[in-house]
Amino acid sequence: MKYVEQVLENLKKHNPNEPEFHQAATEILTTLAPVVEKHPEYEKAGLLERFIEPERVILFRVPWVDDNGKVNVNKGYRVQFNSAIGPYKGGLRFHPSVNLSIIKFLGLEQILKNSLTGLPIGGGKGGSDFDPKGKSDREVMAFCQSFMTELYRHIGADTDVPAGDIGVGAREVGYLFGQYKRIRDEHVGVLTGRGLTYGGSLVRKEATGYGLVYITEEAMKARKDSFKNKTVIISGSGNVAIYACEKAQSLGAKVVAMYDSNGYIYDSDGIKLDIIKEIKEVKRGRIKEYADIVKGAVYKDGCKGIWSVPCDVALPCATQNEIDAESAELLVRNGVKYVGEGANMPSTLEAIEIFKKKGVVFLPAKAANAGGVATSALEMAQSSGRMFWSFEEVDAKLKNIMINIYQNIDKSAKEYGYEGDYVMGANIAGFVKVATAMMAHGIV
Ligand code: NDP
Ligand code: 2IT
């Protein structure tokens, strides 16, 4: 049996009941066969076996008291996956679906994504099955303080630097940072996505969505195309979705549909983003309210229907496996030309196959959504240097990073004989840097 197949089979056997982790590992490992063939020394060094095994997994209890005085207990996770090229870096996700499989898939993806940014950051991910939805600010604070009261001993500005993800935004990062600082008595860049008054970076809030549009624009440019007058659909209506919408609109695109976990809105005139921001960022409300406010807009229950809306560009920005084979077929039939993944692993393996076969330009998550973590690394640089860069400066750096990522994955795909296959390109380009560093470190 070939080396990669053997490693994948062992991974499935020794990590049962982790379907998301299996899925991410399958996508990655199957594309690495040409790399390990070129480098027989990797097999001798057990490189893939070490690459797919987290350096450390931390699981902990998070007790907290709700507004009724009831004691609640959630699970806390931090997977410190790979520190070959820099300190562990990656977000925290608070969502009731969170389990070890999900955190491990996110951590594995993060290693290659962070490598693609070209900046010195390793891969990690964490979170909890805590659901911030419907909780009071005090309850969220109590939870965050309890979470950090365990996590603080495992992280540090040069060790492991968490940030946001689903359910973790400015409010949560603020409470987490406040507790870290109180326990450690250190005002350092131990979390990114911090507020602008206490060490945060301009553009971090916008970075993932903006970066997604910058890289998609670059793929369009290479095809003498642009966002101008394109019809776009964006799933989700959280941090990534909102700023992808903002940038796409500024480039002349018409965004006609968005969703939250209850259902989607369709506005044939183009979505009014200020109304979405008011509902989502200010009121923490439901997207349904948009159709009550905007004449002519419609709301439909259920998320899946969004993929039946005809579009030129689809930007999935909510969660994993939101586009299955059926939705991919529908998108293709309705004429989609570009799919850029803002969320992590939003397309199933079957959906990716369909996009590839039908010639859709497909930009995989680890390249397309790397702008968020890249700007986190810029935040770390500003913290270490005790500096504060202007919006224009950070935005220009972000754009440059996204263009470089596109060129890098395009080049790697061509080099290995898979022109236009950016899944191959991203996995290979991301992996080679990590592998080279791991080889240099010996068997660790
Ligand atoms: P938010 O919590 O801000 O928003 C998440 C959005 O997705 C909400 O609209 C939410 O709806 C929806 N959503 C979440 N889970 C589901 C689900 N199971 N089914 C349907 N809809 C769902 O998160 P972000 O915008 O930060 O993250 C979105 C995606 O982008 C995630 O995959 C994340 O890993 C990825 N990402 C985020 C980065 C960042 O910088 N924040 C960086 C790179 C990737 P509802 O409110 O109803 O739950
Ligand atoms: O998936 C991701 O890249 C993120 N949630 C952002 C991680 C970070 O450290 O900024």
Image (tube, rainbow, N blue to C red):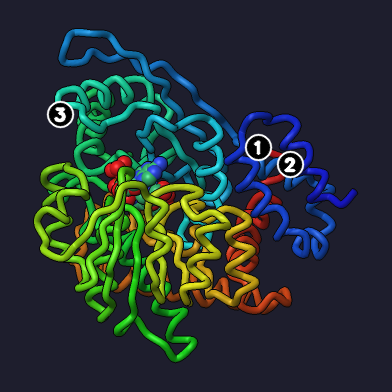
Q: Which mark is residue 161?
A: none
Secondary structure category for the residue under label 3 = helix
Residue located at (25% from left, 43% from top): 169
Residue located at (23% from left, 26% from top): 179
Residue under label 3: 137
Q: Quick one: 432 or 354, which is closer to the camera?
A: 354
Task: Give the Cα distance between marks 2 and 1.
Answer: 7 Å
Q: Which mark is residue 49?
A: 2
Q: Does the closest atom of ligand 2 sit within 8 Å of the Cβ of label 1? A: no
Residue located at (87% from left, 52% from top): 2
- Tell me which amino acid carries mark 3: Asp
In this rendering, position of residue 250 left or right of residue 34: left
- Tell me which amino acid carries mark 1: Glu
| Residue 101 point in image, percent of width and height | 56, 34
Q: Are marks 2 and 3 in contact (CB under 8 Å)?
A: no
Corner quadrant of residue 397: bottom left
